[in-house]
Amino acid sequence: ADGYYEYILFDCVYSASDYSDMVYLASYSFNKVVYLQFNSSVGKYVGYTELGVKYAENANKDQARMQQEKAAVDTYCRYNVQLDDTSVLDKS
């Protein structure tokens, strides 16, 4: 098909049952190529293409955006994973 495909994938990765090792990832892709990613372990955006590097430099300068992304491991990941685990694990 003709056209372009851009998407953002938000991931919460963890293995410990207390969520102490949880990592929040926001991956930005264009036509199946990841060009930019925020990783809560790294604490900043990283660019993987020439354009992604420029986006990362700009995003990392935005203090409000960085605070929001750094907090997402708690506000987005832990919050939703606890809800999911409660609804699944309590049913056994």
Image (cartoon, rainbow, N blue to C red):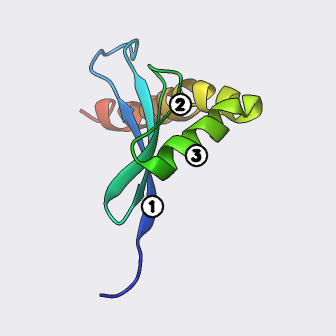
Q: Which mark is residue 7?
A: 1
Say above or below: 26 vs 7: above
Q: Nearer the viewer, mark 1 or mark 2?
A: 1
Q: Is residue 49 visible?
A: yes
Q: Which residue is mark 2?
A: 79
Name the quadrant containing residue 76. Answer: top right
Single out the residue that lies furthest toward the bottom: 2
Instruction: Please determine whether, in this image, residue 28 is positioned above or below residue 87.
Output: below
Amino acid, disc 2: Tyr
The residues tagged by marks 1 and 2 sit, at their Cα atoms, a distance apart of 23 Å
Q: Which residue is mark 3?
A: 55
Q: Quadrant of residue 84?
A: top left
Q: Looking at the image, which residue is at 59% across and 25% down? A: 70
Amino acid under label 1? Tyr
Q: Residues within 10 Å of mark 2 (few under 14, many from 20)?
A: few
Report the mark closest to the observer, 2 or 3: 3
* Crowding at mark 1 (Cα within 10 Å: few <14, some 14-19, many 20+): few
Pick the quarter of the image with the C terminus.
top left
Question: Label 2 vs label 3: CA separation?
Answer: 28 Å
74 and 47: which is toward the camera = 47
**Secondary-structure class at tag 1:** strand
Give how far across and how far down residue 27 sits, in percent: 43, 45
Asked whether disc 1 touches disc 3, contact meaning CB atoms under 8 Å apart, the reply is no
Apparent side of residue 26 relative to residue 16 in the rendered image (left or right): right
